[in-house]
Structures are given as structure tokens and as C-alpha cells.
Amino acid sequence: MKERTLSKSYNFEGKGLHTGACSHMKVSPAESGTGIVFVRTDLGVAIPALAENVHNTARCTVISKGDAVISTIEHLMSALTGLGIDNALVEIDNVEVPILDGSARQFVEAFAADGLVEQDAERKYFEIPEVIEVKHEASGSWVRIEPADHLSYDVTVDFNSRVLGVQTAHWDETVDYASQIAICRTFCFFHEVQYLASQGLVKGGDVDNAIVVVEHPIPDAVFKQMSELFNQPEIKVTPEGYLSNLVLNFPDECGRHKMLDLIGDMRLAGGYLRAHISAYKPGHTINTNAAKAVQKLI
């Protein structure tokens, strides 16, 4: 298979989920062999999207070079990977990628609408010579990467939640990424939102870009406070245990979003793998550690 890039440049703008800072971002075609490179245009610093440049993984994936930081790159990285885009230049004028609707949908819809450009170079697949397993003993999380002829993923998500239960998701290159994975939005638990709001975080969160899971009954005073934070006085809790801010695309949308994140984070290994990747309770820390382990091995 030949390498592929975008057919033109695309502009996105919006606030970041965690910082609330508004960013303007342009995603453009790039030459063969470039990979995915982010550029902080306000600082004039280029940061290749590689696991070695991961700076932080607290609630999102952050890359940096010197004082230049770019956070929440995982949804865009997932979109580029799910569509099979090898090379792209991402120019951004602030610290965080716009959250948009909390999924990769708007990226995918924009990029796919005009088609992709096939380039002269052959795509280089990373062959995995042996099994790689990364574990986090305290949480029980793990990511396992096994040699295979084709790229595939299996994810199991278990938050010990009465609302979510245990959710599983599968993706390989025969599954339509755009309709099955890209539209799945980020999620959090109501008690997490309370805490993060108290810490001055989730400044860009609103009822349009996150599924909120309500695990326990909410006192009226707390519910009123959070409704004001979201500027949604009519918000309620559904019988299924979610805030009524949106309708789920799939019953297992949260599990599929964890797949979306894993695909984006594993791209930080530097390219496309010939491997079967399975994960239990994945998150950005263990995902990017797995990408680093792949980088180290190959």
C-alpha cells in the first residue's frame, strides 16, 4: 500500500476541553515520510507526534518540546489513523486541540469529503517480532501487542460501574471507522466533573461534547450547581443513568470511545503496526507507555 495524505488543508477552531482556551488549527497535506507533525505557530516550534515526546497523560495525551506544549491530541491522531492518513502537518496557535463535539467525527467528515491523495512511497508497516505486554498492577490495566498479519484492536472497559457495566469494542481495517468509532464521544462520571470543576479544570466542557455518567443519586443543591456550570437548567438524569444532554449513538459508545483513544495513542509508535492490540481498562498513560515500548523494540 502507498502512503496517503490529505487532498487540501482544513481549518478547525474551538475551545479546549481542559483549558477552555480557544485554538485555531489547520491540518494540511505533508510530504511522504513526514508522519504526523504538530507545530505551535505562536511559538514556532514543531513537535513530531511520537511517544518519545509525550509530556503528560493526565486525562488526555500531551506532547511537548522545550516549553511548547500541545494537549488533547488523541482524537485527531485517531481520525488520521482510522482513515489511513500517513502524513499530515497540524498547525495550532494555542495549547490545546479543540474538543469540538468530543469525538473524531468532525475531523473525519472534513478529511473524507474530498478524498485522500496517494503518494509515491510505499507505506512502511512496523513488524512486531515478539509479544509486548504493558501492565499497571495497581489498576489491573494492561495492553498486549502481538505479532499479526494485519492491524486489529480489541478493548475491554470496566469501571465497576452499574451504568456502564463491562463494555467491549473491536476495530480492524475492515470495520468502517467513520461510522463505528469516530462518532463516539468522550465521557466522564458526574463525580469527576464535580471534582474537576472545583479544581478549575474542564473549562471547555459543556453539554455538547461529553457523555456524563451518573453513578449515584445527586443532591438537588449539587445538581443545580452543575446545571448552572453547564448553562443547562433543564438538564436531567435519564433512566439509564446518563445526563440528558445528549442521546447515545450506541449503547456501548463509551467503550467505543476508549477504542478511539487507543487508536490515536498507539499511532504515537510512529506509524502503522502489523499487530493485534488488546487492552483491558486502557487509558492514556498505559496506552502511551505501550507506544513507547513498541518504539523501543523496533
Image (spheres, rainbow, N blue to C red):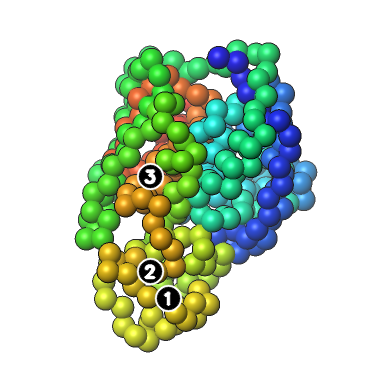
Nearest to N terminus: mark 3 or mark 2? 2
Question: Which residue is under mark 2?
Answer: 243
Crowding at dot 3, Cα within 10 Å, few <14 / some 14-19 / many 20+, comes out as many
- Does the CB distance between marks 2 and 1 fall below 8 Å? yes
Closer to viewer: mark 3 or mark 1? 1
The residue beneath circle 3 is 256
Q: In this view, does 262 lie above or below 147?
A: below
- Residue at 52% across / 71% down in the picture? 200
Q: Which amino acid does label 1 sit on?
A: Ile
Q: What element carries label 3?
A: helix
* Front residue (pair 136, 32): 32
Q: Residue at x 55, y 50 (%)?
A: 72
Q: Is residue 47 above or below residue 21?
A: above
- Residue 235 at x, y = what percent? 42, 76
Please tell me the numbered disc located at residue 235.
1
The image quadrant that residue 50 belongs to is top right
Amino acid identity at mark 2: Leu
Residue at image coords 59%, 29%: 85
Q: Can residue 106 be seen in this view?
A: yes
- Residue 257: x %, y % from top left: 41, 47
- Using the image, determine if residue 150 lies above or below residue 103: above
How far apart marks 3 and 2 lie (CA) works out to 19 Å
